[in-house]
Amino acid sequence: MINELNDLVFLASLITTLFAVCCYLVFFTNQREKIRQAARSFFLISGILQTWYIGARLVLTGYTPVSTFHESVMFFAWATTWAYLSFRWRYNVKNFGTFVSILVLFLLFAAALVSRDIMPLRPVLQSYWLPLHAGTSLVACAFYSLAFCGSVMYLLQERELKKKRFGYFYSRLPSLDALDQLNKHCLLAGFVFLSLGILSGIFWSDQAFGVYWRWRDKEICSLLAWGIFLFLLQQRFSRGWRGRRVAMLTIVGFGIVLLALLGVVYPSGGAMYGG
């Protein structure tokens, strides 16, 4: 009974996110403040429903729900939603919610397309290091997803400015400087959490398998993404890198983060962590 009710909560979070996306897209077109307020309300409700769903699944399973593909993508969507909502309280980036809500909707659809069955936690996964590793890694993914959305917006705005004929997107997107600052803050937050995720994963691997690093596809992609973002931050702070090349590298890095999340080859049975 509780599991069926929780499935309805998941469906409700998907529907409210869809409503949020529709409202954000309408606002993007007509720029009416009431429509934006409705979009923000729907997105906030979606975040609350996602929290309820994850919390209820935690109670049902007895462990942090990050061990299957559905749980990991759901946690990714939840972290992205709340990273954006908390970010919006501090910064005002025009129409940022439009791009973020579309990404969250995509993640929720991906979570809906796979099995939501609760799987027994295998002995190798019964470690306090695993939720720390998976949780911090997925929070890193959330901040990198914000950086990705900001980078897409940057490239669209830059294209408008280069044409020297201000078209549809120009008045609807933030300034290049605002988007560049957004990128910097999200990259820094994501790097901190990704570093914690990799470090805790090293300790978990040693505890579970007796080795610190196994050079599997997932580990290689995580290390490659970490190296790209380290390079980006180093170039930003030491050489003043900004602009188009930073946006492009951010998009590449986010793509590699997604490959790491998927494990490159989707494991059978929906398990994200195995032997």
Image (cartoon, rainbow, N blue to C red):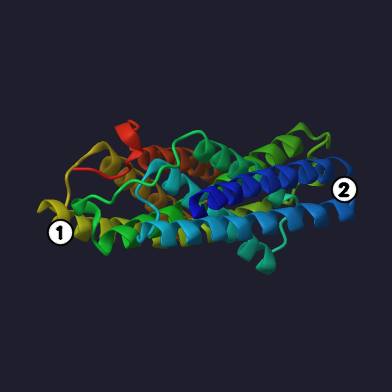
Q: Which one is earlier in the sequence, the residue at label 1 or at label 2?
A: 2
Q: Which residue sits at x=42%, y=48%?
A: 72
Q: Is residue 232 visible?
A: yes
The image's mark for residue 31 is 2
Q: Could you tell me residue 204's position as x and y percent?
A: 21, 58
| Kind of residue indicated by mark 2 | Gln
Please identify the quadrant where the C terminus is shown: top left
Tell me where residue 43 sits by quadrant. Answer: bottom right
Spot occupied by residue 160 in the image (x, y as percentages of width and height): 75, 36
Marks 1,2: beta carbons within 8 A:
no
Q: Amino acid at mark 1?
A: Gln
Q: Which label was assigned to residue 207?
A: 1
Closer to us: 92 or 33: 33
Q: Who is closer to the viewer here, 100 or 248?
A: 100
Density class for disc 2 (Cα within 10 Å; few <14, some 14-19, many ≥20) is: some
- Identify the residue at image location x=68%, y=44%: 15
Classed neighbour count for the residue bearing mark 1: other residues with Cα under 10 Å, few (<14), some (14–19), many (≥20): some
Picture residue at 51% right of the left edge, 33% below the top:
113
- Image side of residue 216 versus residue 95, left or right: left
